[in-house]
Image (cartoon, helix red, strand yellow):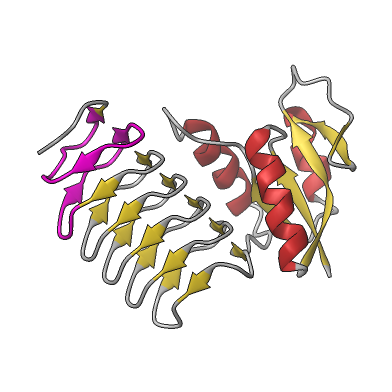
């Protein structure tokens, strides 16, 4: 198994570790945390250093994954992903064995498909995305780079979600709706119409 370095040591990292262990393709080499994080280990894996140590750690890594979470802003995940991509290091797709990924779908590098995810035929998911537990990405849907589709969300057929957007837990997006870039949709919303770039939706949309 190839050794994978994880960038980010919070709650999302714990969930990623569980998926990586279950997938059983990579082994966790260690974790890189923020400079103000005093942690020495996480779920039994060592914290190898902080942000400033990234260049030295990458020199000995075989693969890496951004394991920082994303809600209001994708900026930190984008910064870390771009730093990794610039090195030419392997940025694998990580997929739980309980996720269904259609062979007719496309998933970009550095994306994680967590437990119970369904990615249906002709769906397209970009780079550095989180498709969280039990989320549905239906046929012909398009998810841009650096997006987080959260737990139990339903992205229906033909939906387009722009880059750096967040789709909260339990959100349902009607088929064919277009969501702009840098959009934040709060938990439990039903989205029945298009949302422009930069929208924040914390109440019902119809």
Tally of marks: 0
180 inside magenta stretch: yes
Is residue 19 inside the magenta stretch?
no
Residue lying at the far top of the rendered structure:
36
Position of residue 47 measured from the top left corner of the image (x, y, whole percent): 85, 35
Residue 71 or 188: which is nearer the viewer?
Answer: 188
Indicate left or right for 63 with 119 as reference: right
In this rendering, the answer to whether 190 lies above or below 51 is below
**Which quarter shows the N terminus?**
bottom right
Residue in the picture at 44% in, 44% down: 150
In magenta, the rendered stretch is 174-200
- Residue 89: percent from the left, percent from the top? 68, 59
Residue drawn at (71%, 67%), measured in percent from left and top?
23
Quick one: which residue is furthest to the bottom in this view?
103
What is the magenta segment's predominant secondary structure? loop
* Residue 88, quarter of the rendered image: bottom right
Q: Position of residue 35 (x, y in %)?
A: 74, 21
Residue closer to the observer: 35 or 135: 135
Q: Is residue 146 above or below residue 42?
A: below
Q: Position of residue 128 (x, y in %)?
A: 51, 52
What residue appears at the point 26 percent right and 27 percent down from the top-left corner?
A: 200
Residue 199 lies left or right of residue 60; in this view the side is left
Q: Residue at x 32, y 33 (%)?
A: 184
């Amino acid at each position: 198994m190839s050794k994978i370095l994880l960038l980010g040591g919070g709650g999302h990292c714990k969930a990623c570790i569980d998926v990586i262990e279950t997938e059983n393709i990579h082994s966790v080499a260690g974790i890189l945390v923020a400079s103000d994080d005093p942690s020495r280990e996480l779920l039994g894996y060592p914290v190898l250093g902080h942000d400033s140590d990234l260049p030295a750690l990458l020199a000995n890594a075989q693969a890496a994954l951004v394991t920082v979470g994303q809600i209001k802003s994708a900026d930190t995940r984008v910064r870390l992903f771009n730093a990794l991509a610039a090195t030419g290091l392997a940025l694998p797709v990580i997929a739980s064995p309980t996720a269904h990924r259609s062979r007719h779908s496309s998933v970009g590098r550095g994306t994680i498909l967590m437990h119970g995810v369904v990615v249906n035929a002709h769906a397209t998911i970009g780079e550095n995305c989180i498709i969280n537990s039990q989320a549905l990405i239906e046929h012909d849907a398009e998810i841009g780079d650096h997006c987080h589709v959260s737990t139990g969300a339903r992205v229906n057929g033909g939906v387009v979600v722009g880059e750096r957007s967040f789709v909260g837990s339990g959100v349902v997006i009607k088929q064919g709706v277009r969501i702009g870039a840098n959009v934040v949709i709060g938990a439990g919303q039903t989205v029945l119409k298009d949302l422009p770039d930069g929208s924040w939706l914390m109440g019902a949309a119809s």
